[in-house]
Amino acid sequence: MLITALTLLVAAIFFVWGKIRSDIVALIALLVLTVSGIITTQEALSGFSNSIVIMMIGLFVVGGAIFNTGLAKIIGAKLLRLAGNSPTRLFLLVMGGTALIGGFVSNTGTVALMLPIVVSMATGSGTSARRLLMPLAYASSMGGMMTLIGTPPNLVIAEIWEEAGNAPLTFFTFLPGGLICVVCGTLLLIPLSKWFLSPKENNKKLEKGAVKSLSDLVSEYGLENNLFMLKAETSSQACGRTLSQLDMRKEFGLEALEVRRGSNGPNLLKKIKQIAAKPNTVIHAGDIIYVRGEKNDVMRFAGEFGLELQNSDNSPAMEFYDIGIAEIVLMPNSPIINRTIAALDFRKNYGVNVIAIRRKSKYITRGLASMEIRSGDVLLVQGSWSAIDSLTSETSRWVVLGQPLAEAAKVTLDYKAPLAGGIMIAMIISLVFDFVPSVISVMIAAVLMVLCGCFRNVEDAYRKINWESVVLIGAMMPMSFALEKTGASQFVSSSLVDSLGAMGPLALLAGVYFTTSLMTMFISNTATAVLLAPIAMESAVELGVNPLPFLFAVTFGASLCFASPFSTPPNALVMPAGQYTFSDYIKVGLPLQVLLGIIMIFVLPLLFPF
């Protein structure tokens, strides 16, 4: 017992200290307990095969797809209209919406679903995501108290209550207590989040020095001015010809920027393909050619080759899926200075097109082929993201502004948003009605997101998984074995309950609640509920009082644990996105946990009299 207690104490100290990553601390603690023989190797590794950990991995992928496809931005924009310009209204909207979903979907699933949406909402409103993400995790746990299926500890106490020969608890038996919890928790979090979850200074500095976004570049260079879409129908004379054979630059004064190609049939893996305009690019029936030039010249070109103008009134918006744009700044002694764009043949040598030049305050977009490059010029290039990224190795010639692959990761595959939305809704329905086990529902949704092209590739999906959180939860879960095998948990819970029982039912209720709350900081809330619910039931029977408020004290104490990032999966899920430290959870979560505990100790006997 001593080794277990010391290991957890030292781990807690390092968690608070924050100088060593929390997942490394958890792994070291796990190894100490294993090497000392307190837990077996099989028990030590059991956390990494736990359904909650596997479900977390799947939910990271689902959440990444929601963000990747722009679905989060779409939903966030609609919710932002309800919030208006009020940060407080936005905060209340996040809390209320999350708590409502949390009543029907697991709190882990709720956070994974809402996290990308809330990040988009924070960005759109100019609010710090730090102020919203931790309350998001807490709201999911509080919302889970409103229904029978909201959180596993609710099911645990319902089973123990029914096994004792009592009438089953209904779906909404938890609703009154859950509503009080959500309302009180929200009111407490408004000042707490404002005081302790302000943006970090280094983030502010980073935002000020941020590289131009893709939309900034499009606007700055006027790329959408005089931009037209021409569609090649089956009867078009352009079909089967290359762009060089169309000779649009010499004969019509036009420049092709890209060719957009869609699938000819139902193809879930890919529906839109962007092709950077190259001389050898062959035009197929159904292709849309994006060209830039004067409208009269465009109409003359379209008429000669039987192309259909798609945008007669407004210029189309440029989109970036497979191809992107970036600025390159020439080195003072670059060997390409004083040479023309045509002579350098960027398309052949680097796989990119030069589509504009910034020369001091002047932007040049026409007649680029014969343009001679001068010292100090900034070139705007277009091509596949990988081709643009390869330019970063030519350090003797130029410097690529920004990180192309990072910019590619920010581009949303918005044409996949309806598909991602359908998968997400199907996952929620399956979670609510429990058609298959929750972890299977989530994994099916994650695999479908990958197969249906909601990510650029499988590697992109893996990058969305926050492995620090996965390892943290997986390493902490086996701690319950150590506490149970050494008798530490039984000793602590029995001692507290026995000593407080003589002081009356309210004191015993408080002891049960805060014992549960304390233990949940070190082991999972489900394991805590399984351990303490029978003890609470037996203690109430010995006092001759109604056991129901004591069982509810167990489930509320187990679920409303906010002072640690690893006490519940939702707390761990928001940790990296909000850039929180262990001390952030102490500052915000500990007072919330204690104050809510005090409130519920007095509320539970009113809802379920002794």
Image: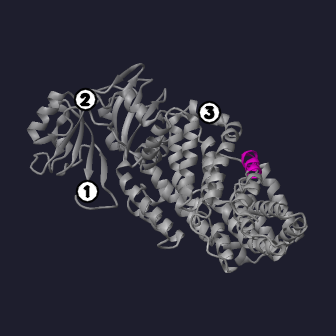
Say if mark 1 contacts mark 2, CB within 8 Å: no
Magenta span has 270? no
In-image side of 34 versus 297 (left or right): right
Magenta span: 582-595
Distance (Cα) linking label 3 and label 2: 37 Å
Amino acid beneath label 3 = Lys
- Residue 263 is marked as 1
Q: Which residue is mark 2?
A: 226
> Measured along the vertical axis of the image, is residue 534 above or below residue 600?
below
Q: Could you say where residue 535 lies in the image, as x and y percent from the top left? A: 79, 73
In-image side of 66 versus 188 (left or right): left
Residue 141 appears in view: no
In-image side of 40 versus 122 (left or right): right
Is 300 or 374 nearer to us in this picture?
300
SS category of the residue bearing label 2: loop
Distance (Cα) linking label 1 and label 3: 43 Å
Disc nearer the start of the sequence (1/2): 2
Query: At x 46% / y 30%, what residue is drawn?
Result: 329
Q: Which residue is mark 3?
A: 204
Amino acid beneath label 2 = Asn
> Measured along the vertical axis of the image, is residue 505 above or below residue 224?
below
Magenta span has 590? yes
Amino acid beneath label 1 = Ser
SS category of the residue bearing label 3: helix
Q: Could you say where residue 354 lies in the image, as x and y percent from the top left? A: 34, 34
SS assignment for the magenta stretch, majority:
helix
Would you call the spot at circle 3 few (<14 residues within 10 Å), some (14-19), or many (20 or more)? few
Distance (Cα) linking label 1 and label 2: 27 Å
Q: Could you say where residue 392 lies in the image, as x and y percent from the top left? A: 48, 41
Residue 227 is drawn in which quadrant? top left
Q: Nearer the viewer, mark 3 or mark 2?
A: 3
Query: At x 78% / y 50%, what residue is drawn?
Result: 16
